[in-house]
């Protein structure tokens, strides 16, 4: 329904004003059909996230319940089969319309791999990392940090904040000394509506069940200066989303000098984090707990941590606003769309 609606809106817009180049950054690939075949435009796209991916197909095939594969479907073989058939046909259609683009830019290696598989008739895809405001975070001090672990991001189901709480619980439970007695966690993010607020309430209940009430604080809907303050005070940044398409929040953590522990998948794995060099990767609560312990045991300002922070900040420069501008211009001008 969304795909057909996007085609209708694009048809109405292109009837009012028809450009030479139709440049989509919304991910609505079905609009390419209208722009190229009906309006005669050249089509370019900057893809942040594929509408459907082979990972999504695998989830349905393996009947694994998750935020986009409801347990009511995953528990039923018939429903899973019907959803799989729908996904396969949608993926084929998505691949056909996506291949109508003359120029395709993607935001990460992970996205590139999926788009190249799905839009296999597209001439070429170029990786252009999205712009991140790294420069404004480079003035934050690298030393004198507090024993605070932070996460940033909206309280959406795919961010998996529950994994962060479970990992923190494992860290404290496995400690045989009082080394981590002062460690705190702050979950910083916004709520889009009532469903997100209910999710926060459930997370607060989980924190209580895990005995973390006095250790965990939820910092909700605060302005950017509050976030930046914690970027400069905390020691560790934690990211738990599976298959994050890129990870601007992860880059911000690196630029601010946090010891960053990101999920071992998606953009953080393919493009951002080199384990042990500028941060760590993890997938289970135990993995996250082990990496948090490594970052805390020698002291937050240990020689190893300072080395990681410096390398993290330097590596984040690859994703600056200026680098994006330069790469975008180079790829666009070399594409031949202006001829």
Image (cartoon, rainbow, N blue to C red):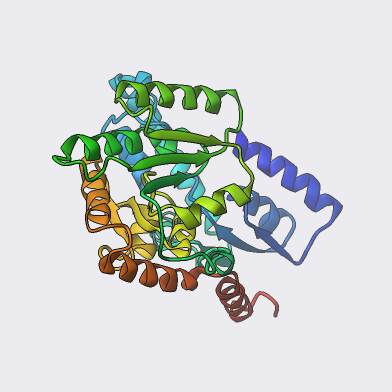
Looking at the image, residue 129 sits to the left or right of residue 206; the answer is right
Q: How many circles with numbers are drawn on the protein?
A: 0
Residue found at x 62% / y 56%: 25
Q: Quadrant of residue 98?
A: bottom right
Q: Quadrant of the C terminus?
A: bottom right
Front one among 287 and 170 = 170
Residue 53 makes an appearance in the image: no
Q: Position of residue 49 (x, y in %)?
A: 49, 51
Q: Position of residue 12 (x, y in %)?
A: 79, 45
Q: Position of residue 97 (x, y in %)?
A: 55, 52
Residue 298 makes an appearance in the image: yes
Looking at the image, residue 327 sits to the left or right of residue 87; the answer is right
Q: Quadrant of the N terminus?
A: top right
Residue found at x 30% / y 25%: 211
Front one among 268 and 190 = 190
Front one among 96 and 5 = 5
Q: Is residue 191 above or below residue 238?
A: above
Residue found at x 46% / y 60%: 251
Residue found at x 22% / y 45%: 179
Q: Residue furthest left?
A: 176
Looking at the image, residue 34 sits to the left or right of residue 190; the answer is right
Looking at the image, residue 279 sits to the left or right of residue 47; the answer is left
Q: Quadrant of residue 279?
A: bottom left
Front one among 187 and 213 = 213
């Amino acid at each position: 329904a969304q795909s057909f609606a996007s085609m209708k809106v694009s048809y109405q817009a292109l009837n009012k004003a028809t450009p030479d180049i139709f440049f989509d950054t919304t991910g609505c690939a079905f609009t390419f059909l209208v722009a190229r075949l009906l309006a005669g435009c050249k089509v370019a796209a900057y893809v942040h996230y594929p509408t459907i991916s082979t990972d999504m197909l695998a989830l349905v095939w393996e009947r694994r319940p998750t935020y986009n594969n409801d347990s009511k479907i995953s528990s039923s073989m018939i429903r899973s089969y019907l959803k799989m058939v729908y996904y396969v046909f949608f993926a084929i259609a998505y691949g056909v319309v996506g291949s109508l683009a003359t120029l395709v830019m993607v935001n990460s290696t992970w996205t590139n791999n999926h788009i190249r598989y799905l839009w296999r008739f597209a001439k070429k895809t170029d990786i252009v990392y999205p712009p991140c405001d790294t420069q404004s975070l480079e003035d934050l001090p690298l030393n004198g940090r507090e024993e605070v672990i932070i996460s940033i991001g909206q309280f959406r189901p795919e961010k998996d904040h529950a994994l962060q709480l479970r990992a923190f619980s494992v860290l404290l439970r496995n400690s045989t000394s009082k080394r981590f007695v002062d460690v705190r966690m702050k979950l910083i993010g916004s709520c889009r509506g009532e469903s997100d607020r209910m999710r926060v309430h459930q997370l607060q209940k989980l924190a209580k069940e895990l005995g973390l009430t006095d250790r965990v604080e939820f910092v909700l809907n605060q302005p950017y200066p509050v976030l930046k303050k914690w970027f400069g005070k905390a020691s560790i940044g934690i990211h738990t989303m599976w298959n994050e398409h890129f990870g601007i929040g992860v880059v911000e953590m690196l630029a601010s000098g946090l010891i960053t522990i990101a999920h071992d998948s998606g953009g953080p794995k393919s493009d951002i984090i080199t384990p042990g060099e500028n941060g760590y990767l993890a997938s289970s609560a135990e993995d996250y707990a082990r990496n948090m312990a490594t970052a805390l045991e020698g002291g937050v300002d240990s020689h190893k941590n300072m080395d990681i922070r410096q390398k993290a900040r330097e590596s984040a420069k690859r994703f600056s606003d200026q680098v994006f501008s330069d790469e975008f211009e180079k790829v666009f001008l070399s594409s031949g769309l202006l001829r």
